[in-house]
Image (cartoon, helix red, strand yellow):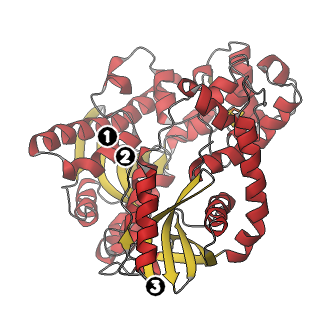
Amino acid sequence: MNLSKSKYVNGVQCKKMLWLDKNKPNEKTEIDNESVLKNGNLIHEVAKYLFGEHINIDFNENLSEMINNTALTLESYKNVVITEASFNYNNNFCSVDILKKVNSKYEMYEVKGATDIKDVYLKDVSYQYYVLTSLGLNVTKVSIVYLNNKYIRKGDLDLKKLFVINDVTQKIIELKEEVKANIDDINKYIENETEPNDDIGLHCFKPYECAFFKYCSRNLPTPNIFNVRNLSLKEKDAFYKKGIYKYENLINEKINPNYKIQIEYELYNKKDFVDKEKIKEFLNTLKEPLYFLDFETFQAPIPLYDGSRPYDQIPSQYSLHILENEKLEHKEFLAEVGIDPRRSLAERLIEDIPLNVCTLAYNMGFEKGVIKKLAELYPDLEEHLMNIHDNIKDLAIPFKWKWYYSKKMEGAYTIKIVLPALFPNDPTLDYHNLDLIHNGSEAMNSFAELGNKSEEEQKYIRERLLRYCELDTYAMVKIYEKLKEVIL
Ligand code: SF4
């Protein structure tokens, strides 16, 4: 089989993944990793300049072209930095993110978009080391390059501070024999003519979620142990291995009672549960006028603005519903494209939310985190922003603690699950009925792409972004009203 870095890593996780990929590719489920891929590409592009001048081997579907161009470049220079240098040894292909040639010695640098080192990266790099050294290259140093989450941008990007370079040479040398054995194993396995019957388990989720899980678990009843929310993967796997995966069997097992509620409600088709006293206590902590707030943010792996770090959540939009004596008012903010949105958003926020009022967020940790960062960034606005921060209450609490529980919530308490459970037949509260943008990641991606759109397209997308965010806070208002209704 022709292996690549990613195929090798997949094969080490589970050989069956490669077998299915070859023989039953249509059984794959889509896993949304569009933004991960985009971020990864961007980080690679920036990291290529870590060692200054370099020669890039352009991608070519004909991999031989890339391999030949690499060989020519290496022959032409005694000392050179090549990005995407490509090699093939015995049908094992790889492109090295950054390859530094110093006289006749080589240093390999593998760039990752993470902010720490994960074990799986060593697998990826050891495969590349195996290919290069098997071809006779004298690789003297192997490093993993990743983002430094302590780096705070001030002015121009400082690549030496933005990236951490971790020398893993010794670990990689030790893995060389293992790589060879793994490749032999994979090649033998892939030749199976009939489908191997390897069972599902922890390896279906670690280090990466496998796109074939739905297919491989097709014989399990629905729901089953893997549908129990919040239970750790380790526990799920342990039950599964003991043959305990049906809800009727799980109900008698020792499981955190908070998680067991999901099994119990679905198994016995139980009616909604409402703890009126607890909900009443919660509602008594709220005082109208109420400000229902929701932010949309985007994450830039490479800090775009002064004072920001890799992957900081940059707020770009908010929706605010204000409720007083049954009168509802709506305010909103959406940043302009191409400029740092934080200052203008913070200024509008303190205009829209006065001091000492009760603000409601759903899962408030996120909103509080955004406001706290804005307060740190703008000391002149700190007092007001922290006043909003300190007066935020969390509307998710009654659902998080299951004071209000419906089997339709399937153990979760996110607004996207709670809302249809409480209002199953209200089309105005159905995110599916929105145009273009239906969830947070679509909103994030759409905003990030705005700069590449025509004026007309921008107008259209901005309107959809506003309606999406508006629904988030309108949904909160309806949930609040529902809580008031159920305690009567
Ligand atoms: S779902 Fe699990 S068993 Fe099936 S291919 Fe993926 S990792 Fe392997």
The image quadrant that residue 39 belongs to is: bottom left
Amino acid tagged 2 = Asp
Q: Are marks 2 and 3 in contact (CB under 8 Å)?
A: no
Q: Which residue is mark 1?
A: 469
Percent position (x, y) of residue 353? 29, 54
Amino acid tagged 1 = Cys
Residue 133 is left or right of residue 389, and the answer is: right
Q: Closer to the N terminus: mark 2 or mark 1? A: 2
As displayed, is residue 421 above or below residue 453?
Answer: above
Crowding at dot 1, Cα within 10 Å, few <14 / some 14-19 / many 20+, comes out as many
Residue 88 visible somewhere in the drawing: yes
Amino acid tagged 3 = Lys
Q: Secondary structure at mark 1?
A: helix
Percent position (x, y) of residue 418? 51, 29
Q: Which residue is mark 2?
A: 294
| Closer-to-camera residue (479/209) | 209
Quadrant showing the N terminus: top right
Q: Which residue is mark 3?
A: 78
The image quadrant that residue 275 belongs to is: top right
Picture quarter with ligand 1: top right
As displayed, is residue 200 above or below residue 14?
Answer: above
Residue at 36% over, 75% down: 307
As displayed, is residue 100 above or below residue 92?
Answer: below
Between label 1 and label 3, give the one nearer the viewer.
Answer: 3
**Mark number, residue 6:** none
Q: Are marks 2 and 1 in contact (CB under 8 Å)?
A: yes
Q: Closer to the N terminus: mark 1 or mark 3? A: 3
